[in-house]
Image (cartoon, rainbow, N blue to C red):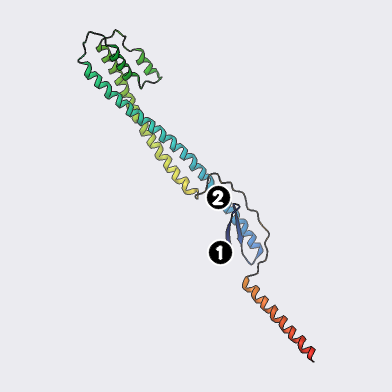
């Protein structure tokens, strides 16, 4: 508290702090300036470091959020495909069981089955096992059932990924809140250098200067009066 009473900070537009120490003892003022400079520099550097950490964590959280959105979108697309394939399977019951599909109906099945396909070994195996042009509806039913089983398994995997991403985001949020508190609200791009200490100088209080000025003025007036009296005599 005693040290704080000695200190005064002023902000300059050039991006510099002017830190002033006032004390009757120059050595004590210099010591306080050194101590204050070291403490301020350490705290600000730690704050900037925490701010940069918070910025990096924020980037990680954005990446996690993007991955979660993509996983949810994949879930929705999978569910829409399952609904469409189930609708086709229901309609396939009315198709002649011993006749190949017409070209339009075949392409409809191919679109439902392949629109979400990826270049993975599992999907490549599924695509390579697609029914031939001469295949009957039962072959397509079996093929679509195989695809739906794969999608169901992939949906379970996606659900696990989303849960893991949620846990990761919670951990990142805790780290972000901690670093944000330590950052002191400083910018991560802030660069801090040490203090340039200026030699101490004596500063007269305004009240003291007024008294001294009054005494000097009174002395001068008395001197003039004495001179005038001497001249008369």
Q: Nearer the viewer, residue 56 or 228?
A: 228
Q: Is residue 82 above or below residue 102?
A: below
User: Measured from the top left, where is residue 207 in percent x and y?
Assistant: 62, 73
Quadrant that contains the C terminus: bottom right
Q: Return the residue at label 1.
A: 5
Looking at the rendered structure, the secondary structure element under dot 2 is helix
Q: Is residue 229 above or below residue 196?
A: below
Quarter of the figure with residue 159: top left
User: Measured from the top left, where is residue 216 in percent x and y?
Assistant: 70, 78
Left or right: 151, with 18 as reference point? left
Return the mark for residue 44.
2
Q: Nearer the viewer, residue 86 or 204?
A: 86
Label 1 and label 2: CA atoms lie apart by 21 Å
Q: Are there few (<14), some (14-19), or many (20+) residues within 10 Å of tag 1?
A: few
User: Measured from the top left, where is residue 155 in percent x and y?
Assistant: 32, 27
Quarter of the figure with residue 79: top left
Q: Are there few (<14), some (14-19), or many (20+) residues within 10 Å of tag 2?
A: many
Q: Is residue 215 above or below residue 83?
A: below
> Residue at image x 73%, y 86%?
225
Q: Nearer the viewer, residue 108 or 65?
A: 108
Q: Earlier in the sequence, mark 1 or mark 2?
A: 1
Looking at the rendered structure, the secondary structure element under dot 1 is helix
Q: Residue furthest bottom?
A: 233
> Residue at image x 49%, y 49%?
185
> Residue at image x 43%, y 40%?
172
> Residue at image x 25%, y 21%?
86
């Amino acid at each position: 508290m005693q040290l704080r009473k000695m200190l005064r900070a002023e902000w300059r537009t050039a991006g510099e702090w002017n830190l002033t120490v006032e004390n009757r003892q120059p050595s004590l003022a210099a010591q306080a300036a050194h101590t204050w400079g070291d403490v301020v520099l350490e705290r600000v550097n730690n704050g900037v470091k925490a701010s940069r950490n918070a910025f990096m964590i924020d980037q990680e959280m954005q990446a996690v959020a993007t991955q979660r959105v993509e996983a949810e979108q994949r879930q929705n697309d999978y569910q829409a495909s399952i609904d469409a394939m189930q609708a086709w399977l229901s309609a396939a019951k009315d198709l002649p069981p011993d006749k190949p599909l017409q070209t339009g109906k075949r392409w409809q099945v191919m679109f439902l089955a392949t629109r979400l396909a990826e270049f993975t070994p599992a999907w490549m195996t599924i695509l390579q096992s697609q029914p031939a042009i001469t295949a009957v509806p039962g072959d397509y039913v079996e093929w679509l059932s195989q695809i739906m089983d794969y999608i169901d398994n992939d949906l379970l995997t996606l659900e696990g990924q989303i849960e893991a991403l949620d846990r990761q985001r919670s951990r990142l949020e805790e780290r972000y809140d901690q670093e944000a508190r330590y950052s002191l609200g400083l910018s991560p791009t802030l660069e801090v250098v040490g203090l340039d200490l200026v030699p101490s100088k004596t500063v007269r209080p305004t009240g003291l200067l007024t008294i001294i000025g009054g005494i000097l003025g009174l002395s001068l007036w008395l001197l003039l009066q004495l001179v005038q009296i001497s001249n008369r005599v």
